[in-house]
Amino acid sequence: MNGNIFRLVILALLAVLALPFAAVAQDGEVTDLGEGDLKVSFWHGLGGSDGATLNEMLVNFVDENPDIGVTAELIPWDTLYAKLQAAFLAGTPPDLVLMHASELPQYASYGVIREMSDWYTSGGGWLPDEDLAPSTYGGMHYDGVLYGIPLDNHGMGQWINVDHFEAAGLDPDGPMPDSYEGWVELFQQLTLDENGNNAASDDFDAENVVQWGYSVRQYPRVIFLAHLAQHGGSLVSEDGTTVTVNSEAGIAALQNSVDLVYKYNVSPVPAGFNAWEGYANGALSVLPAGTWFLNFSRTIDVNSKAIAFNQFGPEPAAWFGAHTFFVPAILEGEKLGAVETLLQWVSANQGHWAMSGQVPALLSVQASLDPENFPSNIVMGASFADHGVVDFSSTVTAELYRTGLEPELNAALNGQKTAEQALNDAAERMQAILDRGE
Amino acid sequence: MTGASARPGAGPDWRPAWLPEINLKRREEIAAWLFLTPFLIFFAVFIGRAMFAAVQMSFYDWHALRPSRPFVSFENYEELLRDDVFWFALKNTIVFTAMTVAGTTVVALAAALAVTQPVRQANFFRVLLYMPSLFSVGAVGLIWVWLLNSQFGVINYGLSFFGIRPVNWLGDPALVLPALSLTTIWWAFGFPMLIFIAGLQGIPEHLYEAARIDGANGRQLFFNITLPLLRPTILFVTVTGVIGHFQVYGQPFIMTNGGPGRSSYTVIFYFYHTAWASFRMGYGAAVAVALAVIMAVVTVVQFLVISRRVEY
């Protein structure tokens, strides 16, 4: 009897220890859809809440196209780029891959992705060129040739906790500030210590904050790019040869975010703070996040509302990019036909993609969205159309960002360097990368 | 068809007549080579060739997908010498390795001593303590990110009962390497524990009996018998530990992404960033070759220092 109990305890322990494996196994998942003999392998990095909508669309596609199956593999973005490099080298890339438009020049310059001009109406195809916003359409080009099919305009906005706003006596439906000082004041009113004092109060205890007004944790690069543009700066000079990230505008832009943490105490130190979870648990009032947050917002017990991205500088600006489909240059025959069918179907069903919160790439679909069902798409989409800024486009963009800029932004926001020092260090590394890439 | 002669006591000789007689030493050598050959083929194809390719690649401006790969001689190595991020990552790697090897060795030895005591269910505890080693680095990283979380982490929750304010384990530049090291010690001490158990079982019991008769206490037994006779085991554990932990990558990749800032950059993490995220395979290869050389030097030094006092 004792032996049985002992074995039972061991089995229970093993089961408990195995739980993490089950949890981990759900990430990096492969979804095999459809019974069709012609299988399209598809890689993407939509690990945010928008991935669920993509899967719904693919299920609908294989239902309507029984001859074609889709094996969709979700891979975190950074890993996807590394894996893709190896796959191209080995000559075994997926049949279709979804990446960011900013990656296009690099892969196009290597000659590993297919020219897509023949799929646009200007080349006799089915995707109307004129139905894309100029910035999106321009981002599909490298050396004057079209290389991608855009899925959306995804970009930054903000998600606010309506109950926090109302509790602080703020109107969540009213106009938002249009200056840094205005936003600081708003964040101060929303930041509360454990005694209920807000950050504007003389009695505020910055060591015991239970509710933060804002967080600089998420997406520091794209937020910086927007704030940089708001201050009239740019990452690189107009001729593309000189890094200008450490200009006065750049330093002012980064200093704004740094001060929210260390001067005004309205944002936690970013490292170690999980902003999405903080927002979900009521510990954060204004979450800078993008169009992709919609599905997640529906799963949490927070009265949320999407608003446009904040304005810290003199001019408004909001970062946005485009999820873009690419096809390997080596793909041909039936597989290429199946991929074209899939992309044509996805483009025709961009209205469904809008349910993920993302702004569809096609202007006609954007115009068809109704404010009642798609409020976040519309408010953020309008900001992208009005004052959107996109990534710097070059063959070394990935290296500029990942090796040069992002670690320095991270260092400044975590108090390891001053804004000026961080941007000077970033500029030095980025200039070397740019010079080497020329 | 068999050989005409057979050595006394060696049994019947099934050697074909055309095969010359081979002496025992030669036969043992042949047997050894036959056993080694599969591994050597594997080594040559999958490791030796890759090492050679890496060294070769480090002399080129080699972007994996770019058609042209110009020869740049020692330029990658010259850049490496000037690259402050590489040196910073190397310093981090050395600090991490020192903390982790020391911690793993001490914890593994303590665990081995505990589970070799004559207690009931000792095997159960051996299995239990070894279990973390079976986890993948991905699972370990994700588990510990939550355990160490500054907002909701169990560790901070436990510390709060002692009046300790929440600690930002993975966000504080001064704590991030110790936190990664702590994670790794928990994950990795199982294998050296097994090695120590084997080492402890190899110490003759009569040495302890004689010492006890002479009045030695437990502390004296440990420091004068156990520890000296475990030196070969300690050498093995530390040398393999240094080699393994010098190549740390998964923990910073999953738990901190090298941050905050570059506070948890390690050499292999930097190699990944350079070669795979920034596509600079040639420079990445130079980083990898430099690390291999440094590890070889460290290993030789370790052997020279520790093996002087090893009693086999």
Image: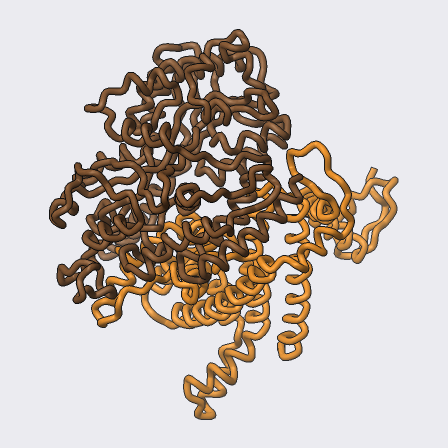
Chain colours: A brown, B orange
Residue A182: where, in percent of width, then height?
26, 49
Q: Residue at x 44, y 92 (%)?
A: B215
Please identify the quarter of the rendering in which residue A229 is found. top left
Q: Which of the two residues, A300 or B311, is positioned nearer the viewer here?
A: A300
User: Could you tell me residue B301's position as x and y percent?
Assistant: 66, 71
In front of the other: B204 or A334:
A334
Q: Quadrant of the C terminus of chain B?
A: bottom right
Q: In this view of the protein, can residue B43 be seen by the observer? A: no
Above or below — where is A304 with respect to A254?
Answer: above
In this picture, is B142 found above or below A46?
below
Residue B236 in picture, x, y percent from top left: 58, 66
Left or right: residue A267 compared with residue A393: left
Whether residue A79 is visible: yes
Up the image or down, A129 lies above or below A268; here it is: above
Query: Farthest residue in the top direction?
Result: A124
Q: Residue furthest front?
A: A314
Please name the residue shown 37% across and 20% down the image.
Answer: A58
* Image quarter hosting the N terminus of chain B: top right
**B290 displayed left or right of B90:** right
